[in-house]
Image (tube, helix red, strand yellow):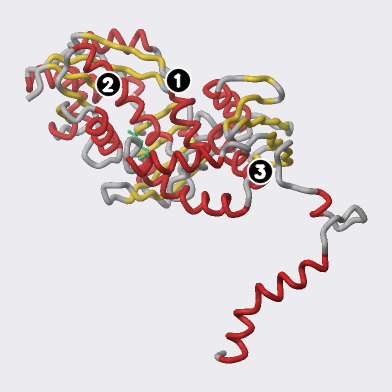
Amino acid sequence: MAKKVVLAYSGGLDTSVAVHWMGKEWGVDVIAVAVDVGQGGDFDLLRSRALAAGAAEVVVVDCREQYADDFVAPALKANALYEGRYPLVSSLSRPIIVEHLVEAARRFGADGVAHGCTGKGNDQVRFEVSTRALAPDLEVLAPVRTWGFTREDSMAYAEEHGIPVNVTRASPYSIDENLWGKAIECGVLEDPWESPPEDVFTLTRPTATEPVELVVAFEAGVPVAVDGKGMGLAELVVHVGDIVGSYGWGRVDMVESRRVGIKSREVYECPGALALLMAHLDLEGLTLERDVFHEKARLEPRWAELVYDGMWHSPLKAALDAFINETQKYVTGEVRLRCEPGRCTVAGRRSDVGLYDYGLATYDAADSFHHSDAAGFVRLWSLGVQTWASRQK
Ligand code: ARG
């Protein structure tokens, strides 16, 4: 077994217990690695917790911009929604966490990578596939999947060994968050018929009452400015999410098909992600040639499924990215979003390289379309069906 491992450390109960438990049961040195992908929280407190739990080293990496530019941007270009609804919040963050785990493993000469996932979820799949893709020589350790503790057992273990955890604020929910949104599971949500209690929501609390409009500018498929103010993608996603979320919009409540065969009830809050995905798709409607637009739409669910299934680092995903990037060259322009209590919609769009031609589209006097061309085109378009109808139908 590995002697020195890097652990993906969240600061929560399970990964804190894991630091101690792996040392005690497996005799390994643990380097706790916390990756900031916009989940919020106090990283100084996290550092002291990891050390108190027995970590040999703690590494905190601020990856918000890298996460936005290298993970969120491709997802947006791919209009990525798993099962048509889930913007891949947790699925997107695991591969970047693994990149930094592997980097830390190399730096500290570790021979293993550990994660705090259970055996029932998708995150274990993502951690392990990405680790094997990036560092096939490293051993993968999964203490939480091994020990078989209930939540109470973990709390008792923490208490017995003096591991500081914030059990006072113990939420009945399992939460995973980053700048692309928030996933909420467990507790009362495990009954798919029950409505989520309003108090599970933090990013989409309806407080704003006056309608507002936002103009989002895109360049080559990526949003670069809001209302004329240029910003980096990480900042922009949070900015749009704050505004849109204040109208109580951006929630998803669904039963989802996990990679491991389980149907689970998932609640998400992704105001920024859902607003930007809507705006991006709308701008593609204006700027992409029809065949490209339609073919891309056929490939998008596959992209989302691959990423959901942990295949961020895989040859098919790389090939699809090449196609998608090619399509984004002219996805440049502006989309006007309108926010009102309970909703966010696209109210307008424009682009200097858009394919909308007023002369071709209009029914007014400015019409430049050759109407007579249509007759021959439609005659040939229907010829096969007409022949079939007259002989066989
Ligand atoms: N169901 C979502 C997914 O598989 C969210 C997972 C959330 N992870 C967590 N550890 N709470 O991507």
Which residue carries the number 2 mark?
Answer: 101
For residue 248, side relative to residue 196 (left or right)? right
Whichever of callouts 1 and 3 sits on the residue coming sooner in the sequence is 1
Q: Residue at x 81, y 49 (%)?
A: 358
Whichever of callouts 1 and 2 sits on the residue coming sooner in the sequence is 1
Give the spatial CA distance, label 3 vs label 2.
39 Å
Disc 3 or disc 2, which is closer to the eye?
3
Across and down, in percent, residue 144 comes to 19, 31
Q: Quadrant of ligand 1?
A: top left
Mark 1 vs 2: CB contact within 8 A? no
How many numbered marks, from 0 up?
Answer: 3
Q: Residue at x 29, y 50 (%)?
A: 262
Residue 368 placement: quadrant: bottom right
Can you tell me whether the CB of the residue at mark 1 lies under 8 Å from the nearest atom of ligand 1?
no
Residue nearest the observer in this picture, 331 or 92: 331
Q: Is residue 150 above or below residue 170?
A: below
Looking at the rendered structure, the secondary structure element under dot 3 is: helix
Q: Is residue 167 visible?
A: no
Label 1 neighbour load within 10 Å: few <14, some 14-19, many 20+: some
Tell me the tag on residue 64. Answer: 1
Name the kind of residue labelled 1 in the image: Arg
